[in-house]
Amino acid sequence: MAYRRTPAVQARLDAQRETVLAAAVALLAERGYAGCSMAAVAERAGIATGSMYRHFAGKAELSVELFRTVVTGEVAAVEAAVGKAAADGAGPHRLVAAVVETFAARALAAPRLAYALLAEPADRVVDAERLVFRRAFRDLMAAQIAPAVADGRLPEQDAELTAAALVGAIGEALVGPLAAGLGRDDVIPALISFTRRALGGQHDA
């Protein structure tokens, strides 16, 4: 008969996995992917290295789950900012600017972590996840642009293409400051101004 974990055992494993991920997030923010070896994460989590393999087959699998965990939080924060702006009656420029401002502010507040998400050399599986990450922000922007184009509040344009171009440009603009660990005060206003110009049309307040 195959061994079946009891609910208590499964709960302990689930709790340990959450501890491992929290430790990995902390290390990623301090040292980047290079510092997130299975042994280093195990030490930070206070468990034996062998116990890591109950949860992850190796560093590549850990890195993917770590990336998804952090990005899920970033996307949720941006979605909340857009939701608040929409509730306040914001027009399309302000809604897209809310995406840019929230993403950039959070990145510049945690430059080492943001650099790891955006640009640090890592396993190919992480590069694949970066594409998913970019698409999530592209789709969020496009969802604000498309209806505004349809009802004439923004000039005719391909909402998805504009959004993809904005995501690429903003990521590229942030890489330099993030790599240098700098939280420059002029970056966010410049990115918002760029975003408004890229969208075209009459800017809402």
Image (spheres, rainbow, N blue to C red):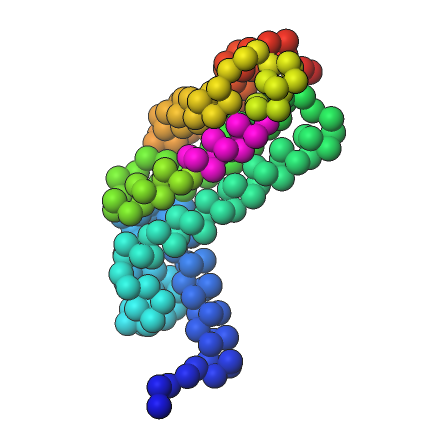
Name the residue: 62% across, 24% down.
147
Q: Nearer the viewer, residue 38 or 109?
A: 38
193 vs 161, nearest the viewer: 161
**Which portion, as a residue range, is magenta?**
134-144
Q: Would residue 154 be seen by someone viewing this image from the given angle? A: yes
Q: Is residue 49 magenta?
A: no
**Quarter holding residue 52:** bottom left
Total residue callouts: 0
Q: Position of residue 196 (x, y in %)?
A: 56, 15
Residue 175 shown left or right of residue 12 in the figure: left
> Which residue: 28% across, 64% down?
57
Where 69 sits versus 183, above or below? below
**Quadrant, the C terminus:** top right
Give the quadrant of residue 50: bottom left
Q: Position of residue 60 (x, y in %)?
A: 28, 54
- Is 170 placed above or below 46 here? above
Q: Which of 20/132 is in front?
A: 132
- Residue 57 lies left or right of residue 12; in this view the side is left
Main SS class of the magenta portion in the image = helix
Name the residue at the right extreme: 88
Image quadrant containing the N terminus = bottom left
Name the residue located 47 percent from the left edge and 25 percent from the top edge: 160
Residue 4 drawn at (x, y percent): 41, 83
